[in-house]
Amino acid sequence: MKIAKPGVIGGLLGAGLGAAGGAIADGGDGAGKGALLGGLAGAAALTRLMASLLFGTSPLDPTTYALVSLGLVSIAALASYVPARGAAHVDPAIVLRGE
């Protein structure tokens, strides 16, 4: 079972918990932001179809877009942070010995 790309674990040998967790979480944050931008563009493009489904708000309501975006970015950050925190507490020497 391959856990990480070659060199990733070796590059983290001797790194502190903050550096290791940050290196692992960075990958998830980029994917979350890309998905958010794609989703916002798609939602704005489909406003005519959404208009009949919305009650009490306009299809391009900036407050709704901002709150939904904030919620999705928060969930993506948490989904990146939790596994990174767990991985940061694993001794790299043990992982390398397992490979």
Image: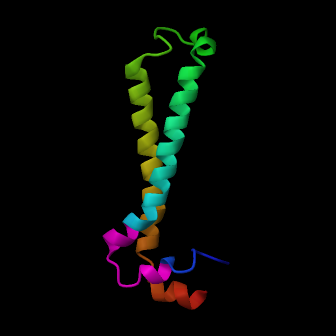
Magenta includes 17?
yes
Residue 81 percent location from the top left of the image: 42, 58
Q: What percent of the width, then of the height, locates residue 19?
A: 34, 70
> In percent of the image, x 50 and y 38: which residue is there?
36
Q: Is residue 33 above or below residue 48?
A: below
Q: Nearer the viewer, residue 43 or 67?
A: 43
**Horizontal and vertical percent for residue 53?**
60, 12
Residue under the image location 54 percent in, 41 percent down: 35
- Toward the bottom, the furthest residue is 97
Q: Return the residue nearer the eye: 42 or 13.
A: 42
Quadrant, the N terminus = bottom right
* 72 lies left or right of 6: left
Is residue 53 left or right of 19 when viewed as pictured?
A: right
Q: Is residue 78 visible?
A: yes
Q: Residue at x 35, y 79 (%)?
A: 15
What span is colored magenta in the figure? 9-21
Q: Among all residues in the image, which is located at the extreme right?
A: 1
Residue 79 appearing in the image: no
Q: How many marks?
A: 0
Q: Quadrant of residue 65?
A: top left
Q: Position of residue 51 (x, y in %)?
A: 57, 10
What is the chief secondary structure element of the magenta stretch? helix
Q: In which quadrant is the C terminus drawn?
A: bottom right
Q: How is the image coloured?
A: rainbow
- On screen, residue 79 above or below 13: above
Q: Residue at x 39, y 20 (%)?
A: 62
Residue 2 within the segment the image draws in magenta: no
